[in-house]
Amino acid sequence: MRTRLLLAALTCSWVLAPAPASSQTPVDLEMTARIKEEGLDRSQALELYHTLTDEIGGRLTGSPAHDQAATWARDRFAEWGLTEARLEPFEFGRGWSLEKLSIEMVSPRYTPLIGYAEAWTPSIDGVLSGPVVYLGDKTAAEVEAMQSALRGAIVLTHKPQTEFRDADRPQPGVGETVRTGNPPRIRPNATTPPRQMRELLQEAGAGVSLRPSEYRDGTVGVGGSRTTGNDAVPSIVLAAEQYNMIARNLASGVPVELHVALRTRYDEGDTRTFNVIAEIPGSDPALRDETVLVGAHLDSWHASSGATDNGDGAIAVMEAMRILAELDARPRRTIRVALWSGEEQGLLGARAYIEDHLADQASREKLAVYLNDDPGSGATLGFYMQGNQAAKTLFDAWLEPLRDLGVTRNIIDGIGSTDHVPFDQIGLPAFNVIKDFDAYDERTRHTNADFPERMSEDELIQSAIVMAHFAWQAAMLDGTIPRVPVSDR
């Protein structure tokens, strides 16, 4: 595992740096010291992380693995003494699981291939064996003219991959502004548009479609659509280099034969998925109905264990709540944790929470702040402030006691495409942590390389301490965290 934090920060982090003299914002340094001591000396973050990523693994929304993770998290919250630990369901649709996948080239030589089925793709009946048909340079009319030859065929739908996701986004707060939770898109390189190709192949009864990943070095990025039909042509994403090798052989007149086995299962009995909710109740009669919400998405894609997207964020907020519960914290406001489902399908869990809990202005006034942990990996560096300068002044004061842990900056810019966005869009103060994009975009995000080796124990520990500290300061604040009206954005 990589290590980024200075050893001195981990061994001496209980020594607090004072808030700047110019700041008028009270900072509860005594509680911060207690949070650091518990987080550093008695952390459970690594144990929790390995349970989530190694034992449970990938957590596709609606899958049995996600349900297992949600139940496990709820039970941990209850075990730690949080109140109202529960699963909150919302309608999602059928789930999907991958039960078997094998893809091999058997001619002109034998080699196993690196490939992953797209989520919600149907099974192949038995083992599909045969020559590969290349369609990457064919127009829709040409594909349609080949329909009889495509029944049951193994087809390549794209041209060889020549553009790769081999760079990360700029690091936040250093140079160019980061405004989105997603890296720049790489467009498919195919003569026939993918949607039209899928329709033509379905009409022809093709056996399986193969397309290349946009990542290098055997890294495969794969997602999927929950609207994929049971009768769709099964779809597999191959490592780009192997896809290109097959395409080059075919272009040179060398026939290529593959064996493909694919078995998937739809989970249609219960079409709900679940957010995980628990809380530490507020103690101030005047403020306990207000909520400081901390959260991260629990779901992931299925090609790996979802370690950086978003296992590290989920564990940070879980461990933050454990720390506060272990300290027998009595915040003035209620501190509530939410582990979202359906983030990868469109921030669905966060939107369902808003619909259920924040449907009117009166309930929205009770949300003091939402703190989210998602894009990027590594240690927490601060928060994106969504253009809220007044809130940034508060957060800057709260940041000071954490500088010895490598918390260096809050930036005024915002970031999109993650679970704080629906809260921000309705005018609520909602902020996402800043983390590195180093080797995140180009290697781990939504890929078969998203394993826990990309994180270190000290990074997990640090992120949890940061979340616990900010949640506590917000829960104890005398005033309110300023809001930016939607009309002013």
Image (cartoon, rainbow, N blue to C red):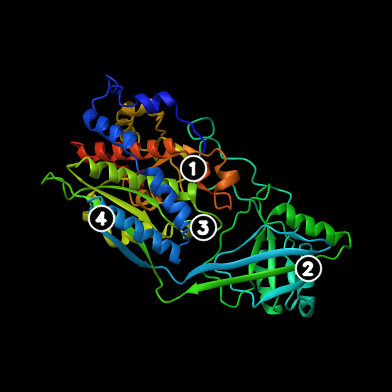
Q: Secondary structure at mark 4?
A: helix
Note whether 66 is above or below 405 in the view shown. below
Q: Residues within 10 Å of mark 4 (few under 14, many from 20)?
A: some
Q: Quadrant of residue 115?
A: bottom right
Task: Name the residue beneath numbered marker 2.
Answer: 132
On the question of residue 417 being in view, the answer is no
Mark 2 or mark 1, whichever is nearer to me: 2
Q: Residue furthest right?
A: 253
Mark earlier in primary sequence (3, 2): 2
Mark earlier in primary sequence (4, 2): 4
Mark 4 or mark 3, whichever is nearer to me: 4
Q: Residue furthest top?
A: 21
Q: Secondary structure at mark 3?
A: loop
Q: Residues within 10 Å of mark 2 (few under 14, many from 20)?
A: many
Kindly identify the amino acid type of the residue bearing the numbered disc 1: Gly
Q: Secondary structure at mark 2?
A: strand
Task: Name the residue beneath numbered marker 3.
Answer: 301
